Image (cartoon, rainbow, N blue to C red):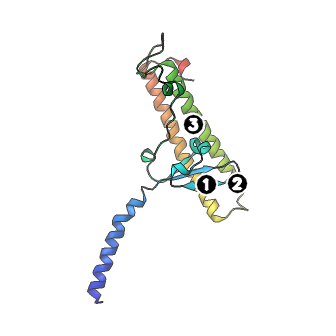
Amino acid sequence: MSGGLKETLMKRLLVALLVLYPLSALAVTYQWTDERGTVNFTEDLGNVPKKYRKKVKILGGDESLAPQTVEIPEQAAKGTGGKDEPAKGKKLYGGKDENAWHNEFQNAAADVRQTETDLAELRARLTDTSRMSRGEYLSLQNAVKNDEIRLQQQKNKLDTLRQSADRLGVPPEFRQ
């Protein structure tokens, strides 16, 4: 093979790699910790046991692009009480009744508390690294970093929810 042909092939290979490399950034990895404290990873949300799906952490990629698990409330599943039908005597704020606002605030606050708890557990595990492999240590550090980011996002979401409630005049008793 001549030097010019080799150089051309190498350039094409380099261009192909540069074009394909960003595609790997779109991959999403799901992380969860089982009851024994084992940290597990998968690229398919379907491989996460159902009892851990609510606590799964999304690593890499854009969380907004990752598939979401949606649970349908029992009332909606049974077909009673349509979306636009407020319960009798209940006032709507921005298209949502008092219960919807209350539930949304409860869920947002619970998410923040859970992430804070998870973060504290991860940081506690990082205090004793004597029996940890380098890979485990790095994985824990990455998990802490991801939880810190997730916590900030959840706090921002709660703040945005508060601002919306203020703007729409939602009474304080429905924000707990």
Image quadrant where one finds the C terminus = top right
Q: Quadrant of residue 126?
A: bottom right
The spot of residue 32 in percent (x, y) is: 60, 49
Tag nearer the camera, 1 or 3: 1
- Looking at the image, is mark 2 or mark 3 earlier in the sequence? 3
Upstream in sequence: badge 1 or badge 2: 1
Disc nearest the viewer among 2 and 3: 3
Q: CA distance from mark 1 to mark 3?
A: 21 Å
Query: Nearer the N terminus, badge 1 or badge 3?
Result: 1
- Is 169 placed above or below 147 here? above
Residue of label 3? 111
Question: Mark on residue 127?
Answer: 2
Total number of numbered labels? 3
Describe residue 27's horizontal placement relative to residue 176 as left or right: left
- Residue 153 lies, in percent from the top left, at 50, 41
* Label 2 crowd (10 A; few <14 / some 14-19 / many >=20): few
- Give the labeled residue for mark 1: 40
Residue at image location 36% in from the left, 69% down from the top: 17
The x, y position of residue 29, in whole percent, is 51, 54
Residue kind at label 3, given as amino acid type: Asp
